[in-house]
Amino acid sequence: MNTVIRYTDFAPHSRILVVSDIHGHADLLRRLLRKADYRPGEDYLILLGDLIEKGKESLGVLRAAMRLSTESPRVTVMMGNNDLWRLEQLIEPTPERDEILLHTTAAFTRYWGSSTFAEMCAELGIPCPTLAELPAVRRAVLDAFAPEIEFWRGLPTVLSTPQYLFVHGGLPCAEDALETLREENAYTCLKYDNFRGDLAARHAAPFSRPVIVGHWPVSLYRREITDLNPLIDRTYNVISIDGGCGLQRHGQLNLLILSPDAAPAYLALDDLPTVAALDDQTPSPHSVSLLWGDNTVSRLPDAPAERLGYAWCAHTRTGRQLWIPEDDLYTQGGQLSCHETTDYTLPVRAGDRLALVKEMPDAILVKRDGVVGWYYGRWQR
């Protein structure tokens, strides 16, 4: 499927709310719009792609997007790489895509509790099919979910306004070359990994309008502290808003608020339980954030002390030595790696509510205002 570009304009003095990478978290989307006091017909709302997968309510998010679009012409729902990937498996099948559809549906259901195709089959009362049964089941799904499919396949890749540019992953060209993208496969803009890093690598000129993107979790751009809040890059005029919802264990769903009368602002929600801090804690001056793509480590033989449940390790890229929970370590391709973690000590005041990520015998890994770190004080649920 090629790139689809849509042009529009925003009425003066209106709020623009942008949410990206909802990933099947319909309840978080509903709560976040309530928290933002979203006003249909007054506010503009952009859902910036990756509506589905990695959550338990992919169909719920898709239908919520359809309903929001029906309620107000000021709503634009856009395509994400996960959306297009799954759509192609349904409407443009090949033997390879059939294998991928069945394999990933099973894998996603095991890991995340559901998947779009599994939800469709369940709603029809049909078990997830074998490869031989797939053609007949696909026909039944496409017939039963024709309104959802029609809406889904009509989602644009790029939204251009005089004030902003919106795209799920990134733009591989300058603004004045947008129209050339119509000849490109949509994945060029949708699955654009490390957009800001690539702009720096090719010494790209800054955009004249802010480019708002999702896709690449913002925490992956931050090497020292795990910060999941939207990232405003004034060097290239890019705003990245993917908070890792559904993808990272400490992830959150971010909502960006744009207004011609104020600086960009944001709100965020997650499903993590919260605890109350009973003691103050000062932040550590130096730290490292270990996340996907930068999470290889090695065990060190001589630990400075004994800590129950931890391993003393060195981070491969920085050489920094730190404690990592034993059950966060795993081996992949012969290389020792770890789930997302950090050695950052979070600044905390007694009475703060902290989102609980992981509990250890002597500390808890928590998130406060979108930033992740360890808390060593007393706490209560």
Image: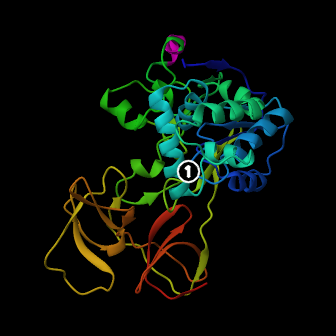
Q: Give the residues drawn in magenta, as a range.
A: 175-181
Residue 180 among those drawn in magenta: yes
Q: Quadrant of the N terminus?
A: top right
Given residues 89 and 327, the one toward you in this image is: 89
Relative image position of residue 243 (x, y in whole percent): 54, 51
Relative image position of residue 100 (x, y in whole percent): 47, 38
Residue 352 visible:
no
Residue 144 visible:
yes
Q: Secondary structure at mark 1?
A: loop
Q: Which residue is mark 1?
A: 54
- Image point (73%, 29%), residue name: 151
Provide the major secondary structure of the magenta segment: helix
- Image point (46%, 18%), residue name: 174
The image quadrant of residue 79 is: top right
Residue 256 among those drawn in magenta: no
Given residues 349 and 26, the one toward you in this image is: 26
Relative image position of residue 329 (x, y in whole percent): 31, 67
Q: Is 57 drawn above or below residue 42 in the view shown?
A: below
User: Image check: 102 left or right of 327?
Assistant: right
- Image point (46%, 42%), residue name: 216
Q: Is 5 drawn above or below residue 35 in the view shown?
A: above
Dot 1 alpha-carbon crowd within 10 angstroms: few under 14, some 14 to 19, many 20 or more: many
- Image point (30%, 31%), residue name: 201
Q: Is 159 drawn above or below residue 239 in the view shown?
A: above
Given residues 104 and 85, the one toward you in this image is: 104
User: Image check: 268 left or right of 11?
Assistant: left
Given residues 289 and 112, the one toward you in this image is: 112
Amino acid type assigned to the residue bearing label 1 in the image: Lys
Furthest residue in direction front, as rendered: 132
